[in-house]
Amino acid sequence: MCRMSESSNVAARLRARIRASGPVTVETFMEESATAYYATAEPLGARGDFITAPEVSQVFGELVGLWAAVVWQNMGAPAVVHMVELGPGRGTLMNDLLRATLVVPAFAKALKIHLVETSPRLTALQRQRLCSSGFPLAWHARFEDVPYGPLLVVGNEFLDSLPIRQFERTADGWRERLVGLAADGKTFCFVPGLINARPPLPASVRDEALVGAIAEGGTAVQNCITAVATRLVSYGGAALFIDYGTAVSAVGDSLQAVRHHAYHPLLGAPGETDMTAHVDFAAAIATASQSGTRIYGPVSQGKWLCRLGILTRAECLLAQARSGPQAQAVVAGVQRLIDDTAMGSLFKVLGLTHPNLLSLPGFDRTG
Ligand code: SAH
C-alpha cells in the first residue's frame, strides 16, 4: 500500500514538474526515484528486487571484517577507529563484519561503527539487526557527518545507486539526455536537451565518441569519492568500494531498472524499481588522485576474495555444515561471488588509502 502511494506520488510529482518547467535531467529522475524506492520498497534479498554479495554469503562480510582488522594493524593500531559503511542495506555486511572482528579483540575494542544511510526504513532494519552487537553504533544521513579521526570505509553496491547524468553525441555536438513526457502527457520518455560544449565526461570519451553514442557522467559519485579521499588523507585509513562497472572509461548506456530480480522498463515506474548505473572506476580513480590518496585496483571481486582466503573459509563452513543442503548453499554462494560468469569479474574492488599505507590486503602493488 505504502509502496504504491509513495511511488505514484513520485511519478505525479515528476509529471507536474515537467509540465511546469520542462524536461528534467536523468540525474533528477534517478534521484527522485531512488529516494522513494529506498524509503518504501523491500529492495534486497530473495523476496526483494535484487541480491547483493553480503546477502549471497556470510563469507563476504566476514572477509571484509578481517581485511579491516589487518588494515587497522598496518595503520599502527589506533586506539579508536571509525568503521563507516556507506549504504548498509539490511545491515547484513556489517553484522557479518562485526562477528568476524571478534577474533582480533583489540581491533573490536577500537571500533566505533557509523552507518551512512538516507532511508528511514532501512535505518530501522539496520538498527534492529545490529543493536545487540555490543558495538557503539551511530547513523548519519551524510558521510560528511561522521566524526573526524582515523577511519575505515566500505561501500558495497553504493556508488551504483547514486544518480548519473547521460549525454548523447549528436551530429551537432553533445546534448544532455533529458526525461520528458510523451504526447499522451503521462508516459515518461527521453528527449534531447540543449547542446553542451563541455559535458562533464572523461576527456577520452568526450573527444572520441562517435555520433549516436551515449555517455555517462555526473557529480554524485565524484563528490562521494572526494569526500572519502580527503578524509583518508587528513586522518589516515582506507576505503573499499565494491561495485559493478568498468575499469576503463567508455561510452555506453548502462542505466538499468530492476524489479523482482528482472529488468523493468527504465522510465516505467519511478520509485518502484531499483535504478542503477555501472561505476566508471577510471573516473573514480582520477577524482581520488586529485585528493592525494594511494590507489589500489580496481581488481575483480573474484580475485580479491580469493586472495583474502575465501576458499579456506568456505572449507571451514563446509566442515561445520549440518546437512547436505546447507553444504550446497555454502558452495553455491561462494561460487556466485567468485565465478567469472556470475559476480566474479563484473564486480570490482577499488581501494583508497592514506599515502603512508604501502600495502592493502587483496591487492598487489599494481592491483
Ligand atoms: N550495501 C548494501 C545495500 C546496497 S543498496 C548491500 O550490499 O546489501 C544501496 C544502499 O544505499 C541502500 O541502503 C540505500 O538506502 C542506500 N543509499 C542510496 N543512496 C544513498 C545516499 N545518497 N546516501 C546514503 N545512502 C544511500
Image (cartoon, grey):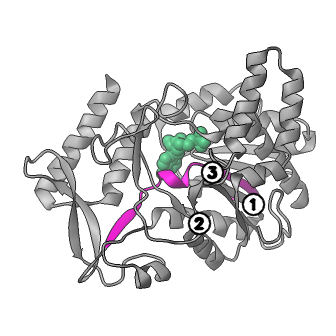
Residue in the picture at 20% in, 49% down: 188
Residue type marked 1: Ala
The residue identified by callout 2 is 281
**Image x and y of residue 288, in percent:** 63, 72
Query: Left or right: where does residue 19 sit relative to residue 159?
Result: left
* Between discs 1 and 3, the one toward the N terminus: 3
Determine contact: label 2, label 3, CB under 8 Å: no
Q: Residue furthest top?
A: 323
**Cβ of mark 2 under 8 A from ligand 1:** no
For residue 59, say whether it is visible. Answer: yes
Q: Is residue 249 magenta?
A: no
**Image x and y of residue 183, in percent:** 7, 52
> In the depicted view, which residue is nearer to us: 304 or 159?
304
The residue identified by callout 3 is 155
Residue type marked 3: Gly
Q: Could you say whether the residue bearing mark 1 is in a helix, strand or loop?
A: strand
Q: Eyeballing the image, is 254 above or below 275?
A: below
**Cβ of mark 3 under 8 A from ligand 1:** yes
> Mark 2 or mark 1, which is nearer to you?
2
Q: Is residue 156 magenta?
A: yes
Give me the C-alpha separation between circle 2 and circle 3.
14 Å
The residue identified by callout 1 is 238
* Between discs 2 and 3, the one toward the N terminus: 3
- The magenta stretch spans which residues? 148-168
